[in-house]
């Protein structure tokens, strides 16, 4: 079965550079979520999109932005990178059912290292 | 948001059943109980969810207390592959695309 695809798997950037992470949800899933996970921490919610519109926002720095495109894939853009941005970034997709929950499916993540 | 409380860590012997508890004393009537797990170096994985009745699927069973203030995730036969952090999460049925918030979960170790 198709899974959530994230690219790249690994990314090394220097401080103050920019990075773009991509997420391709499971076909027909209409919701995408982005999470950041630092070393030894739990995943922290960043932002989500439902039907290509931003649906919720968490602790996402102003230096980060994201969008969901017409084909439902999503991109997380990160500018002025800082050492503290080094983390695993996960994307998840789901189907927003009416009066019913579906579980999230997570991708394998992008490991960002800022040097 | 209603909160959950889980033990920081638990141990289990391989091939033994595992009961992972979760307390959610402030749960509201519209809160669903969800469980996710995260294996080392992998993304979280949906396990199971329920509202009032016990639930079973191929991965696990979810036992929900009658007053819904606690629940237990049951792995019927632990394998080494079940070593992971298990998260118990409440989600309100306001909108089904509400975010999942991960809090401190239970780190399960499985002993061969």
Image (cartoon, rainbow, N blue to C red):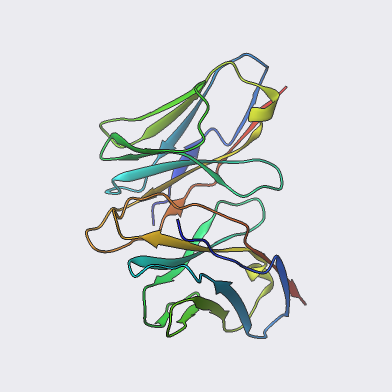
In the rendered image, residue B45, in percent from the top left (x then y), is placed at 51, 59
Residue B72 seen in the current view: yes
Residue drawn 70% across and 24% down?
Answer: A83
Looking at this view, name the residue that lies furthest to the left: A98
**Splitting the image into 4 quarters, where does residue A68 fall?**
top left
Looking at this view, name the residue that lies furthest to the front: B26
In the rendered image, residue B18, in percent from the top left (x then y), is placed at 63, 81
**Splitting the image into 4 quarters, where does residue B110 fall?**
bottom right
Residue B60 seen in the current view: no
In screen coordinates, is B109 left or right of A92?
A: right
- Up the image or down, B107 lies above or below B70; here it is above
Residue drawn 58% across and 55% down?
Answer: B103
In the rendered image, residue A40, in percent from the top left (x then y), is placed at 71, 48
In screen coordinates, is B16 left or right of A9?
A: right
Residue drawn 54% across and 53% down?
Answer: B102
Quarter occupied by the C terminus of chain B: bottom right
Residue drawn 49% across and 52% down?
Answer: B101
- Up the image or down, B102 lies above or below B82; here it is above
Quarter occupied by the N terminus of chain B: bottom left
């Amino acid at each position: 079965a198709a899974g959530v695809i994230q690219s790249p798997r690994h990314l090394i950037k220097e401080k103050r550079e920019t990075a773009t992470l991509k997420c391709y949800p499971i076909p027909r899933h209409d919701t995408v979520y982005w999470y950041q996970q630092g070393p030894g921490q739990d995943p922290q919610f960043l932002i989500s999109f439902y039907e290509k519109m931003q649906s919720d926002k968490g602790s996402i720095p102003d230096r980060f932005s994201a969008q969901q495109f017409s084909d439902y894939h999503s991109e997380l853009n990160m500018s002025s990178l800082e050492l503290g941005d080094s983390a695993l970034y996960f994307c998840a997709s789901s189907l927003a059912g009416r009066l019913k929950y579906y579980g999230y499916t997570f991708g394998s993540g992008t490991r960002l290292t800022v040097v | 948001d209603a909160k959950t409380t889980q033990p920081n860590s638990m141990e289990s012997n391989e091939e033994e059943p595992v009961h992972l508890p979760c307390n959610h004393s402030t749960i509201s009537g519209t809160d669903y109980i969800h469980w996710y797990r995260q294996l080392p170096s992998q993304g979280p994985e949906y396990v199971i969810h329920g509202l009032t009745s016990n639930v079973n699927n191929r991965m696990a069973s979810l036992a929900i207390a009658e007053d819904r203030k606690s629940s237990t995730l049951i792995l019927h036969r632990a394998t080494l592959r079940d070593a992971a952090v298990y998260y118990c999460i409440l989600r309100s049925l306001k909108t089904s695309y509400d975010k999942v918030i991960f809090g401190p979960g239970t780190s399960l170790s499985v002993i061969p």
